[in-house]
Amino acid sequence: MLDFIINPFAGGKDGRKMKKVLSKVEKNLQERNIIYEIHKTTGARTATAITESLIKNGASTIVVIGGDGTLHEVINGFSDFERVTLGIIPCGTGNDFAAALKLPSDPIKALSLILDGEPKFTDFMQMPTVRGLNIIGMGIDVEVLKLYEKLKKKTKFGYTKCLIKALHGFHYTGFTAQMNGQKEDYRSFIACIANGHRYGGGIPICPAADPSDGALDFIAVKEMKKIKIIPSFIKLKAGKVLSVRQTVHKKMTEIKIDAEKPYTVNVDGELYENIPFEVKIVSDKLRVYRP
C-alpha cells in the first residue's frame, strides 16, 4: 500500500503540472496493480497533519508528489522511522532537495525507484522546534523569500530577480557561530546550513553538500566592498561561491548560532520567527527511495 501526499497546486497555481504528473503516476500504478491512495493538501501545514495521521493509522510508505515546501511539511510530520519510508516524485517549481538526491525529473522513473528499489538512509537536519531537509539559513535568503512571496507568478527567474533586488538594499547580519568546539563572530550576507547543495530553484549555495555524508555544511559570505558584490553573485550562480575570498565553508555535525538582533530563519523555503537556531545532523534514521 502506497500513500501519496500531493499539493494540487505544486509547480504552478493553475495545477496543470500536478494534473499531468498525477495522471501518469496513477496510470502506471493501475497498470502494475499497485494498491494506493491519494491524499490532497488543502492549505499550509496540512501535509504535516496528513503525515501524522497516516503513520498513526499504519502507513508504511509515504510518497510526496510536490516540491520542497510539501517535503518540508511531510518530514515535520514523520515518525516511526524504523517502519515508515519516504518516496519523492518531484513536481515543484524548484525541486532542490530532489536534485540533491539525484532523483529523476521524469515521474515514471521516480516512481520506479519506489516500486522497484530499496530505500536508503538519508540525512536530515533537526532543530529544537522544526526539521529541515535541504537548507536552513538567515540573512539575505530570508529577504529574498519575502520579496518572492509577493510575486504573482513564482518562477526560477523571478527568484533570481528578487535576489538581485535584495542585494542592493541588504544590511549585513551580525551573529556568533559555535561549532567544532569553537566560537566565531561574523558580519555576513548569510548564515546557511546546508544538507542539500542548492536552493531557490537551482542556485548552488553549497556545491560540496551531500545529504548522505553524515555532516552539515556551514556557509557564510563575509562583508565585502560593494564593487565585489556583483562578481561574487556571478560566481554564486556558476556554482563557484566557495572560491570567493570572503566565503567561509566548514563541516560539522551540529552548530549553534546567536544573532545580534531578532531574526527570521528560512527552513527549506518556509519562514520561522526567532526560533532557536541550533541544528544537528541526523543520519541512519530516515529512509528515502533514491538512486
Image: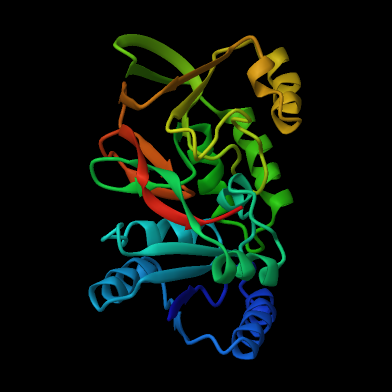
Picture coordinates of residue 168, whole percent (x, y): 64, 29
Q: Is residue 165 left or right of residue 248?
A: right
Who's the residue at 51% across and 60% down the image?
118
Q: Is residue 52 left or right of residue 246?
A: left
Q: Which colour style is shown?
A: rainbow
Who's the residue at 64% across and 55% down the image?
103
| Image quadrant in which you'd find residue 163 | top right
Q: Nearer the viewer, residue 20 or 146?
A: 20
Q: Is residue 200 visible?
A: no
Q: Nearer the viewer, residue 132 or 26?
A: 26
Who's the residue at 23% across and 41% down the image?
128
Q: Is residue 71 above or below residue 57?
A: above
Q: Is residue 198 visible?
A: yes
Picture coordinates of residue 236, whole percent (x, y): 69, 28
Quarter of the rendering occupied by the N terminus: bottom left
Q: Is residue 69 above or below residue 2?
A: above
Picture coordinates of residue 137, whole percent (x, y): 45, 35
| Image quadrant in which you'd find residue 46 | bottom left
Q: Is residue 129 above or below residue 70?
A: above
Who's the residue at 31% across and 57% down the image?
81
Q: Nearer the viewer, residue 256 or 88?
A: 88
Q: Nearer the viewer, residue 108 or 251?
A: 108
Picture coordinates of residue 107, whole percent (x, y): 67, 70
